[in-house]
Structures are given as C-alpha cells and as structure tokens.
Amino acid sequence: MDEGTVEDEALDNNAGEGDLAGDGAVRDRVETDWPLRPWIFAGLLAVAGLAIYFLTDDANDSGPRIAAAAFIAFASGAFVFTAERGRTIAPAIFSLVTGLVVGGLTWRAVGAGNDIADGGYAVAAGVFACLLAVPLFQADFHRRWFRTDYKDIHYFVWTDAITGAGAFAFFLIAWALIWLLASLFDLVGIPLRDLIQADRFGWVYAGLTLGAGLGTLRNQLKIIGTLQSVVLLVLSILALPLAIAIAVFLGAVVVSGPSVLWNATDSATPVLLSIAIGAYALANAVLRDRDEDMVGGPILKWSGYALALGILPLTVFAAISTGVRIDQHGLSPERLWALASVAVAVAFGLAYFVDALLGARGSWRDRLRASNLRMAVATALFALFLALPILNFGALSTKDQLARLESGAISVEEFDFDALARDFGDAGRRALTHLAESENEAVVTAARRAKENANADLRARTRYEDASVDLDKLVFKGGTESERAWVRRFLEVNPNSIGSRDYTHVIFAGPIEVGLYNGSHAIVVTDQGWLGHLLIEDDGAIELDVVEGTLIQSRSRQDNAVLTDEDSTIEVRPFRGRRVYIDGEPVGEPFR
C-alpha cells in the first residue's frame, strides 16, 4: 500500500462524522471502497475471539467474566457492521452502547443464577432489540428520526443479512480448508492438527475468518445490492403458494371451528407464529423498497397483498391458543414471554391489516412501508423494556399460581410445587417457604418435598461444577508405577475432569482387545458418586471419557456407589463391545 492511500484513509476517517445524510447519500457513503476494511475487521475480531477465549475458559458461573465476553462479542460485532470509511467514531459509540446493554443483561442473568426466573429470555430480548437497532443506526435514524428514508432501512436489513450469511459461509469453508491442510501435513509429520485443535486457536481463527469475509463482502455492497434484488425475486415467487395455503387454512378453520387447532396439537402457537413470520417476510419480499422495483406482475403484487391481510388472523389464533394454555395452567415466566411475543405479532398483523384495507385503492404499499419503520422502532423499544429489570415475570407468575391454588382452581395434587422452586426465581422459592408453613398438611408436605428436591439438585450441580481432584487423596488399585504417574499427571493438568476433592479411586480395569480402542487400557475413575472412564495408551497418552462408544469430555452419573476391596475382581467383559465389571456387576457405559 502506498503512502497516498494511507493519507487518504486518515483524511477520510477525520471527515464526515457530523454530516447529515440526505437522499442517496447514505448508500453512496457505505458503498465507498475501503481497502483496509478486511484487514481491520479480521484483526479486530481475531483479538476479540482471543479475549473471549480467556474470559470464558473455566469461567463457570462467573458473572463478570461471562458479561465481559458478551460485551466484547456484541461490541465488536456491531462495529464491523456499522463502521464505514470516514465514519468510525459514531459506530464506535453505538457499538459500545450495544455491548454494554448485552453485557449488563448477561451479568444479571449469570450472576443472579436461579434468583431471577427469566434471565435467558431477558438477554434474548436485549439481543433482539440491538439487532433491530443496527439497520436503524446505519440508516441514520438517530439523526433523521421518522424522516429516515425507508429505502435505506430496507437496504441495510437485506445487505446485513446477506453479508452476514456470506461471512459465515466463508468461515465454514475456511475451517474445512484448514482441516484438509492438517490432514495433508499429517502425511509429512507436520503437527498442524495439534494447533487447530487448541481451543484458543479456534476462537482466533473464527474471528479472523469472519472479519476477513465480512470486510471483503462489505466492500462489494454495490454488487451485493444487485444480489439482493435476485434474492428478493426468488423469495417473492413463494408468496403465491403461501397465500393460497393460508387462504385454505383459514377456510378450514371457519368450517371446522377454531377448537380444531387446540385439539390437533399442543404446539399451535409456535406453528401459527412461524407461518405469520413467513407471510411477513414474503410480503416484504414482494413489497421491496419502492413500487418501481416490484416485479412479477399483478399476480405477485396481489399475493403480497393477500399475505398482508393473512398475518392478523394467524396471530389472533396464536393469541387465542396462548390464552387457552394460560387459562388451563396459569401464568409462568415462559408463558408471559410467549404472550409478549404474540402481542408484538398481533400488533404487526393489525397494522398490516388496517393499512391493506385503507390502502386497497393503491396506497397500501406505501402504508405498509411506513408501518415497517414505525413498528421496527416500537418493537426495539418494547424488547428493551422487557429486557430491563422493570417487570418481574417470576413474581407475577408466582402470584397468579398461588391465587389458583388458594381459590381451588387447581388441586394440591396437580399443583407443580417443584416449578416454584425451579422456574419462578426467588419469588417462587419465597412462596414455597410460605407454603411450607401452611395450615394444610398436604400443602406443607408437598412444599417441603419440593424444597428438598431443589436443595438436592443444587448440591448435585455444585458438586459436579466444583469437582476438582485432590491428588493427595488418590487411591490406586492395580496399574504399574508408570501408569499411575501418567494418570496422576493427567488429573493434575485436568483437575476438573473427573472426581472430587473427596477420595478418588483409580481402578485399572485391563486391556481392550476389540474395536477402535484395541490396545488401550481401560481405567475407571470414581469418587463413589461420579464415574468416568479413561483410556491409556502404551506411551502414556490418555483419552477422556467413553460414553456409548464415543470419546467425549464429560462425566457420567453412577447411581450406585462403586466400592472395591482387596478381594474385588475387576475385569473387562464382552457387552456389545466391551464394558468394565467389578465383582461381576457392570460399571459405567459400554465402549467398543
């Protein structure tokens, strides 16, 4: 690269930050070629990937570390989609805000653990709000507000989707290539495979390839714009069959009655919402960003019109289905989130239905485009509102469930006491404590049993997550001194792999003489509660863990304690392959 190019880059980066985009200026700005873009994006995402690896490695439930990883992931992701040549300061600020929103929600969800009922849903809502905000920011909505040209928003939604999908495809191809190269280098003894199997390399390489692919594609937005028209044309072809299918479906519901939906399946709501989302997407594929770009003649245009009308009845039926489930089982955090999703869908359906009717004489297309902008902003704000700790869905659900129990709407035998402890957060557990002091003996018994179950699950989960072998308390049975040293070294390097700080027994079960692991020696490692297998080779190489014939990094639950003494007989017997037996009783999973 020559010095003139570098100077141009510097000048461009110091110019244009405050310029107010006019008609056509936004596309001209983002379609400007930026030769450094692939290199900057690749480097940025590679560093972000390495940072995420160090933050998440053995992080367990560390709220600050997981939140920092989420901040880096979303801040860097937002920046590579919004940064342009000559415009980096505003995207950097937007990206920092995006990272703070998602990182803060993640910290709350991870740090609070079971104290909040809907941490995962809140994070998802925050992510959804940020995703909606990206094309709005790219189109300068923060400057022009509702004067923003719909063509710009439509342009960014589709170019972001296409370039993002293209970058992911490049990432997959790059991984396939490097695995092929590893196989090639294996032939001449170059250990490339060891490098690419390292976790930190995977994160760095993923960031590198995603950044390079995205940067290259976003330098070709003029070509991507043409590809966008082709994609929309192909999608719009599906509008006619979907419109016909929805008409047939609605006709069948009118004839048979809406109850046929609830009788046919327990998952009517997700099916109806999925079809409604499909109708919305295809209607917009027909609609394009202006009438001049609509293709396919009157058949496709009126197919899009029919889809716009069909969204409302689909979402109304979904709302009724959700209401039926709530009437049957009461509120829960999951059902409240489902209700919020259905409310957004019904709002879109109603807006489209009204616009289609009022604009039936020809203005329906412009009305729908205007509604898209208004609904996108409203949905982003609503999603952010739900994500913030303003409404407590756990408390609302708990209050409703207790009211149903006290009113007799549900019997004590049918009431799900375990759900209060498991799914309703801190409010549910407080309610369970209150119920355990009830005057109703059946309620007291059920509540105390649910509390005991919750405490047992917590102890088991804590024991599993905090398991770490105390090397001074290893008890070996069998094996040579070299084999014992190899196992001790393996457990020292992998302290959380198998066992606990209690006495951990290492039992050398004997050689395996069949299948993929022929020549290996089977080892059982157990602390009389958790059990796992190790496979040890003659050279001391150890593999962790065998489950159903597959080596994985996990532990299996042994319901009965594995006890050995000096007279115990330890052997490997045929069992659809091979399996460890102690005193004639099978232990752990079979392996082949």
Image (cartoon, rainbow, N blue to C red):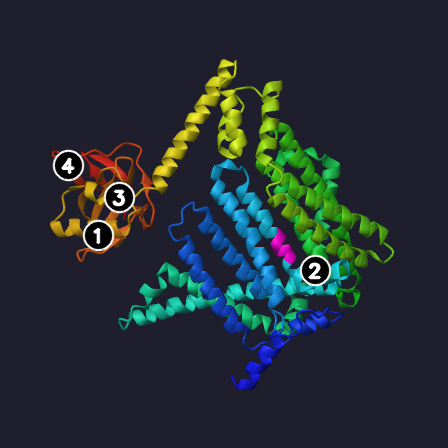
Q: Quadrant of residue 460?
A: top left
Between circles 1 and 2, the one closer to the viewer is 2
For mark 2, what is the residue? 142
Spot occupied by residue 80 in the image (x, y as percentages of width and height): 56, 65
Q: Which residues are magenta?
A: 129-133
Going by the image, does 547 lie left or right of 566? right
Spot occupied by residue 566 in the image (x, y as percentages of width and height): 12, 35
Q: Earlier in the sequence, mark 1 or mark 2?
A: 2
Q: Nearer the viewer, residue 335 or 141?
A: 141
Between circles 2 and 4, the one closer to the viewer is 2
Q: Earlier in the sequence, mark 1 or mark 3?
A: 3
Q: Residue at x 49, y 69 (%)?
A: 42
For mark 3, what is the residue? 469
Q: Amino acid at mark 3?
A: Val
The answer to whether mark 2 and mark 4 are in CB contact below 8 A is: no
Real-space Cα separation, disc 4 to disc 1, in angstroms: 26 Å
Q: Earlier in the sequence, mark 3 or mark 4?
A: 3
Which numbered disc covers residue 569? 4
Element on which disc 1 rests: helix
Q: Main secondary structure of the magenta part?
A: helix
Q: Is residue 132 magenta?
A: yes
